[in-house]
Image (cartoon, rainbow, N blue to C red):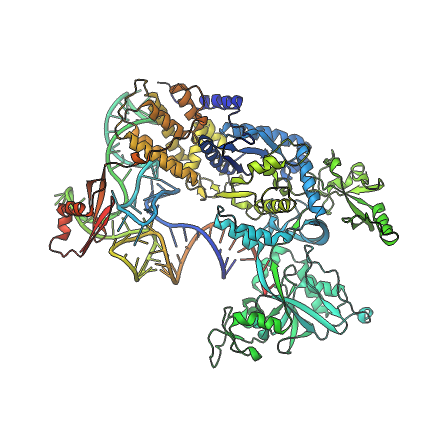
RNA sequence: GCUCGGGUGGUGGAAUGGUAUACACGAAGGACUUAAAAUCCUUUGCCCGCAAGGGCUUGCGAGUUCGAGUCUCGCCCCGAGCACCA
């Protein structure tokens, strides 16, 4: 007998599938469409690794299954090819990223084909292809025109190693998501996408995603972080202003928080100087014994004329200069300083002190809080440290003559005490009553920050905007002189090199704005992009007036191209639009999106945002892009630690392919454990799967054309396998699919089978081990077409059940015997059989039988 | 600290409230072989027992139920995410 030689047969069938275009998806076919998506890879120099294998195999098995079920399946692939590694490689080796990227793509493509992936290569996209990023730029301009892309200067996260700004989502534990370097805060001019405008829609949309894992929805909801409360104003008493500001007190700077959104308003107008705070507990207002403002807000006060004590100024500066990581590390020990200012609690008119402390965040709410130490853990700690009054205003029980002395804050609900006319009121009810009483306004706050969208790096999509001084002047003249009807509604201006410039979007017909060829890719580190040094690219005719303009030199983050790639797959070669509405209508939404947890609050949130925006622009047919999401756990190294080069525990999938073949690799990966679990790779266990495939080969090798008509109980075994495997694939429980296949072989090995049963078994194997199944189907069973276009077997309900089965006999819930009975036996007869059992008699002898429970075709329980 | 997941043999893991430990790895013994590898057969949760057989067992403790790995409550441990968000 010829031995199973995976290397030989796998190459053969991969070529066969390619020439037959077996996996090309047709638009508008009459079949039930299924769009299966995996997160497209970054083509790195290292090639693809285990982290790619897991979702891709899962998606492949599912796609192959659905095709056999008769669906029109699109399982596309592309390349998320912009990004730092290619650029860093270019800096080191003086190779243009375009070239190294192409090399890596070719290599990765070979790998994927070697794994037997049934991707539709005719729809391949590449984010660095100008025909692709033309549309990334075009979508950016739609954001711009809608007022959702804006420029602002603010304190942003800055990675000192990658020398670029980062979005909030890219900071993991105070470190850069890419390189792990501690992130710094830097004051920079940046482009933002106003994702906060979609906070509510992003949150609401989650409720419609029934087929998403709860954990993913929860994580996104937490990240958006909605809180409902009230803003309340406190009057300040004795704010010292510098002499030159004394006469014209107007402390209302264009206050924008560190990421550009409007935040704190320190209104010091006329006689009444006011601090506004946000609280979710207005019911505790009578217990507010001091105010705390964030260093960020304090700094703004300083900048607008507040004359604070030297110690206060020193504290503010010290805190603001501290790195994010250090600030976080010191979080346990509260710091702060008395500002010298006092304020009036609007509920009881008591004078309270105002403090500056960095446990209050500048970028959230108003940047200032009312501190209620009795009912907030953090305020309590601060009050204890600085010996500030702690006044209890909520008691868990009422009426209670005395509230207990607190050794920590009571944050629960209860009844009001010491709160004037509100005494005795339930705290829940008091919330809005007190807020109203002091003229507070309802307010909703989100943790979500606007998305810092510009990067100071070379290898990304140029932001397609031009700055024009001339246009800014023209626009002013138009405005002041003639009231021209055609006034540009969207014309906004910015300051460049100290001069006001109009922001002019590059017209659609001039897109894409291509990345220029360049000598030096090094980031400048100053916050300027390396593109800024290329004079003849930067200097450009203004598309509006034809005068001298300058290009925006920042590029987009890697998340830009990946925020809409799944749309392009629907219509990858469209020259006129990012995708035509008809194929979009046919394919969307993505039916199942396989991917990793690490993207939950990055790509998965960003692309939902883009999609919701495009929906509002009537450019996509539905508000949510992904109908179902399936997340996988990471595969650890054999030592149970995360795979990493420095640890030396990296298992390269290629080694497994070379030794055992792709089918073994695929099946072992699935067999490891539940798809969503984190599991260590165990090289010595692979032989189990390899042995199975070898036995499969031998089993089919015994096949003879002289097939027997009678195959005994094999029909029941096969039918049950069809049912179990189908259900497990539908539920993405791939590990039990593999054990079902193994069980099937174990049970059926010694039967003589009909040819149709061999065929059936082969089809069940096809999604998992596509090469071996094809070999058996065509070469052994002698079929002329591919096994992968055969209809998936259906099971026969009648054949699932055997005529005789084992009924469990219990006494007091403990199994004492197993008795063979005919199917459908009734209570009376089953009872007789059980009571006649010697084993049962032993337990029931001399005891009174209280009752007998009967579960048809399952068990009998005798209670004594 | 808060929010989610989890804790089942030597290991990875299986089990619509109904025979816990399927499937696989490893281990032990045997067959084939000059030998080894490969392959095949047998055993393999723990304890007592020569055996027949019996008892115990899903992190710990309680509860609901005829019956709990599965449901409820409390505790312990592990993993992930967020992290002073007022």
Quadrant showing the C terminus of chain A: bottom left
Q: Position of residue A490 (x, y in %)?
A: 76, 48
Q: Residue at x 86, y 48 (%)?
A: A474
- One can see residue A465 in this view: yes
Nearest the eye: A794 or A200: A794
Q: Position of residue A17 (x, y in %)?
A: 50, 24
In the picture, residue A359 is in which quadrant?
bottom right
Q: Which residue occupies the extreme bottom position in the image? A: A401
Vertical arrangement, residue A484 with respect to residue A379, above or below = above
In this rendering, position of residue A617 left or right of residue A784: right
In this rendering, position of residue A282 left or right of residue A398: right
Vertical arrangement, residue A259 with respect to residue A379, above or below = above
Nearest the eye: A102 or A726: A726
Quadrant showing the N terminus of chain A: top left
In this rendering, position of residue A219 left or right of residue A444: left
In the picture, residue A9 is in which quadrant?
top left
Q: Position of residue A716 (x, y in %)?
A: 29, 33
- One can see residue A454 in this view: no
| Count of marks overlaid on the render | 0
Q: Which residue occupies the extreme right position in the image? A: A481
In the picture, residue A604 is in which quadrant?
top right
Q: Position of residue A432 (x, y in %)?
A: 58, 70
């Amino acid at each position: 007998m010829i031995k199973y030689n995976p290397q030989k047969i796998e190459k053969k069938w991969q070529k066969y599938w390619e020439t037959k275009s077996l996996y090309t998806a047709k638009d508008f076919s009459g079949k039930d469409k299924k769009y299966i998506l995996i997160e497209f890879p970054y083509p790195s120099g290292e090639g693809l690794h285990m982290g790619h294998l897991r979702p891709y195999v899962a998606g492949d098995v599912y796609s192959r299954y659905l095709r056999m079920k008769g669906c029109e399946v699109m399982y596309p692939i592309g390349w998320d090819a912009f990004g730092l590694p290619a650029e860093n490689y270019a800096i080191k080796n003086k190779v243009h990223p375009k070239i190294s990227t192409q090399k890596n793509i070719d290599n990765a493509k070979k790998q994927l084909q070697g794994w037997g992936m049934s991707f539709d290569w005719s729809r391949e996209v590449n984010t660095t292809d100008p025909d692709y990023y033309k549309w990334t730029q075009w979508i950016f301009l739609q954001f711009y025109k809608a007022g959702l892309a804006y420029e602002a200067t603010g304190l942003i996260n800055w990675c000192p190693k990658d020398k670029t700004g980062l979005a909030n989502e890219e900071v993991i534990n105070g470190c850069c998501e890419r390189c792990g370097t501690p992130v710094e805060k830097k004051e920079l001019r940046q482009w933002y996408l106003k994702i906060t405008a979609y906070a509510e829609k992003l949150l609401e949309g989650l409720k419609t995603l029934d087929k998403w894992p709860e954990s993913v929805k929860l994580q996104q909801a937490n990240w958006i972080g909605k809180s409902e409360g009230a803003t309340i104003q406190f009057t300040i008493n004795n704010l010292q202003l510098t002499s030159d500001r004394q006469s014209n007190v107007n402390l209302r700077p264009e206050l924008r928080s560190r990421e550009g959104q409007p935040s704190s308003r320190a209104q010091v107008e006329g006689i009444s100087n006011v601090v506004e705070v946000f609280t979710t507990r207005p019911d505790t207002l009578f217990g507010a014994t001091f105010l705390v403002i964030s260093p960020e807000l304090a700094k703004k006060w300083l900048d607008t004329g507040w004359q604070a004590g030297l110690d206060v100024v020193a504290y503010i500066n010290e805190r603001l200069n501290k790195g994010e990581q250090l600030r976080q590390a010191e979080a346990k020990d509260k710091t702060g300083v008395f500002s010298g200012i006092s304020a009036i609690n609007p509920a009881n008119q008591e004078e309270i002190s105002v403090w500056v402390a960095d446990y209050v965040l500048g970028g959230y709410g108003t940047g200032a809080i009312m501190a209620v130490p009795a009912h907030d853990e953090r305020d309590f700690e601060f009050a204890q440290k600085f010996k500030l009054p702690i006044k209890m205003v909520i008691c868990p029980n009422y009426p209670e003559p005395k509230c207990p002395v607190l050794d920590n804050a009571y944050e629960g609900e209860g009844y009001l005490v010491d709160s004037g006319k509100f005494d005795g009121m339930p705290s829940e009810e008091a919330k809005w009553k007190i807020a109203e009483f002091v003229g507070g306004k309802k307010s909703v706050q989100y943790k979500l920050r606007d998305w810092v969208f510009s990067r100071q790096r070379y290898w990304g999509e140029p932001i397609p905007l031009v700055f024009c001084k001339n246009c800014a002047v023209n626009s002013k003249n138009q405005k002041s002189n003639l009231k021209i009807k055609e006034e540009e509604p969207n014309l906004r201006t910015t300051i460049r090199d100290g001069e006001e410039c109009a922001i002019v979007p590059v017209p659609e017909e001039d897109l894409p704005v291509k990345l220029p060829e360049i000598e030096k890719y090094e980031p400048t580190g100053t916050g300027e992009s390396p593109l800024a040094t290329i004079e003849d690219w930067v200097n450009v005719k203004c598309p509006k007036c034809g005068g001298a303009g300058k290009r925006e030199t920042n590029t987009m983050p890697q998340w830009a191209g990946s925020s809409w790639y799944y749309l392009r797959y629907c219509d990858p070669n469209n020259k006129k639009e990012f995708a035509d509405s008809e194929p979009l209508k046919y394919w969307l939404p993505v039916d199942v999106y396989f991917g990793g947890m690490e993207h939950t609050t990055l790509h998965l949130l960003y692309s939902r945002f883009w999609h919701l925006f495009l929906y509002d622009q009537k450019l996509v047919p539905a508000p949510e892009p992904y109908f179902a999401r399936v997340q996988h756990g990471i595969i650890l190294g054999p030592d149970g630690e995360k795979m990493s080069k420095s640890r030396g525990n990296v298992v390269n999938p290629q080694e497994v392919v070379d030794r055992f073949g792709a089918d073994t690799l695929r099946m072992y990966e699935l067999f490891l454990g539940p798809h969503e679990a984190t599991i260590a790779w165990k090289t010595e266990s692979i032989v189990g799967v390899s042995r199975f495939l070898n036995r499969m080969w031998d089993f089919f090798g015994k096949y003879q054309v002289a097939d027997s008509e009678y195959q005994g109980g094999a029909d029941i075994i096969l039918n049950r396998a069809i049912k179990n495997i189908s259900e497990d694939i539908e539920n993405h429980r791939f590990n039990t699919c593999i054990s079902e296949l193994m069980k099937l072989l174990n049970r059926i090995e010694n039967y003589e089978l009909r040819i149709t049963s061999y065929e059936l078994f082969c089809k069940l194997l096809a999604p998992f081990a596509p090469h071996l199944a094809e070999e058996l189907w065509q070469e052994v069973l002698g079929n002329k077409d591919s096994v992968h276009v055969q209809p998936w077997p259906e099971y026969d309900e009648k054949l699932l059940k055997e005529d005789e089965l084992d009924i469990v006999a219990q006494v007091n819930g403990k199994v004492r015997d197993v008795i063979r009975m005919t199917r459908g036996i009734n209570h009376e007869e089953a009872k007789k059989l059980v009571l006649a059992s010697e084993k049962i008699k032993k337990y029931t002898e001399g005891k009174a039988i209280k009752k007998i429970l009967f579960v048809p075709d399952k068990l009998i329980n005798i209670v004594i």
